[in-house]
Amino acid sequence: MTAVIADPEPEAPRKPLRTKVVESNNQLFRASPLNYLVLVVTFFLSVFPLYWMLVMASRTNDEIVQIPPVLTPGGNLGKNFTSLFDNPDVMFAQALLNSFIVAGSITVVVVIFSSLAGFAFAKLRFRGSGVLLGLVVLTMMVPIQLGTVPLYMMMDWLGIQGTLLTVILPYLASGFGVFLMRQYASQAVPDELIEAARVDGASTIRIFWSVVLPALRPAAAILGLFTFMTYWNDFLWPYVALSPENPTVQVALSRLSSGYYTDQSLVMAGTLMATLPLLVVVVLFGRQLISGIMDGAVKS
Amino acid sequence: MSDITAPVTPARARSPWRSRLSRWDQKGSPYAFVSPFFILFGIFGAFPLLYTFWVSLHAWPLLGEHTFTGLDNYQKLLQDPQFWNAAKNTLGLFVVSTVPQYVLALWLAVTLNRKIRARTLFRVGVVIPNITSVAAVTLIFGMIFAKGFGLANWIIGWFGLDAVDWTAHTWSSWLAISVMVDWRWTGYNALIFLAAMQAISAELYEASAIDGASRTRQFWSITMPLLRPTILFTTITSIIGGVQLFAEPLLFAPGAGAIQGGSLRQFQTLTMYLIENGFTRFEFGYAGAVAWMIFVLVLIISLINILLVRRISGAD
């Protein structure tokens, strides 16, 4: 969730998110064989550790500790998955479900609230909007771990310590999300459309729901994608806040590897399981993911 | 039915009740729309940050009395060798990982900015590490850097070097952790630099080519200066990420005492020290002081970074 906002000035004109980044100046330089070599090596280095994870996850523990290392997948994947899910102390199925609940509910709420606030900042006039938008940008600079101690106490006061709510609540306000939706809304939603709806007697919330939200769909998809990935992968706060009986998948992974279960093939099977949903996302939405990262950075 | 009621609607909209409602709606709605964000941020973002400071002014154990002690925690912290050790490790790991990462990312961005075949494939390739969770990355690389059977020791064995116990020394643990960080983030930064490079107009390159500028010259005189704001902002996000470095060193040597970052604390970071004080020793006041020192550190290195980037890329 750290896509870069290169220019926080509210009035700076921006490219709409959907616009394909213009491939202008790369026409100048044709790639040389050396460039392809660099790219192929990079591709190999990017993918190899994940491939090796698959190799380890499909082997027995004895095969893993051989020298020279095994470099091809074995036939043990199914068995490792079975013992991973069957182990009552690991609760891996529960952890997967928890991660879906946490990342899913954060995503839904963040997309809705960010769209609402983004629309208000982009299209509605109200006193203090400039100052408030500045505050939104500032909130992006606060690292969460600074608040871990009081957050921990607060969850105790609220009587929800150790539950999934503990790791959902602190992430529902996304300054990044509000800013992203505002940038998109200011270009994607024509003022005339809003005016027309007003003349027809639609209330603001009605306008949001029937006119604005459909237009925001592409940006909402990208925000949703990034939010889900971020909180599926989140580690520090769930590690501190969640009880051992109720982990997310990343916390379960850390417990899987720390001492009690030194079966490395099992650890790698768990790691593969935790990575698989996001690999599917990349295969399905790779293009959108890239344009999301790149558009987040473009300063026009 | 709708044909009959249709002409009536405009008249109804003009009724006083309806128009007053609409005025309230137009005035109040914007505030209602932005308030969920501010309420939630206030409760779960701003309040904890400020309350951390209040807690840090106390001796605040998990159970028992909270006694106001003023700045005692900070004074103790400044004389705490373990705190300085964690600060050194955090800064060291940040520099060791960020410098090669940015050089590689720039190089990769320049390469991706060429006219290449299978463009999307290569771009997806560089972003794949970034979708992998830190926990997964650390566990995979923990295997690669395993002492007995790891790939890293096997490969350096080809060159006649002895196997390294990667977690045992400062240099080797820093190197291994930097590799994990860089593997995850280099491609992501490359894409951001690429986006910024594509926003540079082609005419600048054409004009300078006519003037006889070499590619290297073009890179330093056109690309780098125009990339300055992007580099500045990516570095600031890297700093915020860098001081949060936690999962990689924590899971690198798992087991009891993992929070100490190695037998000699050789890779304990500030965030690990914060968590150690807060959630292993349950000294909330002291942990709060660590948190605020981290915040101050972020501000200081961000400022240094702004100055440095201005100078390096030749600000006018």
Image: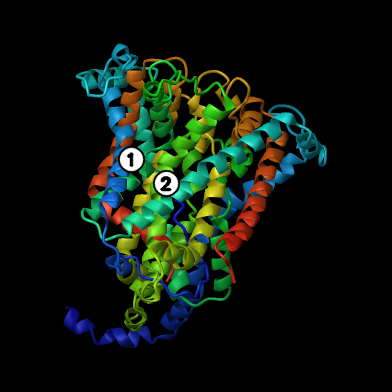
Which amino acid type is shown beneath numbered disc 2? Answer: Thr
The residue depicted at 65 percent of the width and 56 percent of the height is: B303
On the rendered image, what quadrant is the C terminus of chain A found in? bottom left
Residue under disc 2 on the same chain as residue under disc 1: no
Q: Is residue B147 left or right of residue A27?
A: right
The residue depicted at 44 percent of the width and 65 percent of the height is: B217
- Seen in the picture, residue A72 relative to B25 is either above or below; the reply is above
Q: From the viewer's side, name the closer residue of A163 and B151.
A: B151
Q: How many marks?
A: 2
Q: From the viewer's side, name the closer residue of A141 and B199.
A: B199
The residue depicted at 60 percent of the width and 19 percent of the height is: B263
Q: Position of residue A32 (x, y in %)?
A: 27, 55
Q: Which residue is mark 2?
A: B186
Q: Label 2: chain?
A: B
Quick one: SS at disc 1? helix
Can residue B189 be seen? no
Image quarter of residue A79: top left
Quick one: SS at disc 2? helix
Q: Position of residue B306 (x, y in %)?
A: 61, 59
| Pointer 1 local density, CA inside 10 Å: few below 14, some 14–19, many at least 20 | many
The residue depicted at 64 percent of the width and 51 percent of the height is: B301
Q: Position of residue A109 (x, y in %)?
A: 41, 52
Which amino acid type is shown beneath numbered disc 1? Answer: Ser
Image quarter of residue A74: top left
Q: Label 1: chain?
A: A
Q: Is residue B275 left or right of residue B150?
A: right
Can residue B275 be seen? yes
Q: Is residue B86 left or right of residue B67?
A: left
Q: Which residue is mark 1?
A: A46
- The reply to whether callout 2 and callout 1 are in contact (CB within 8 Å) is no
Q: From the viewer's side, name the closer residue of A72 and A276.
A: A72
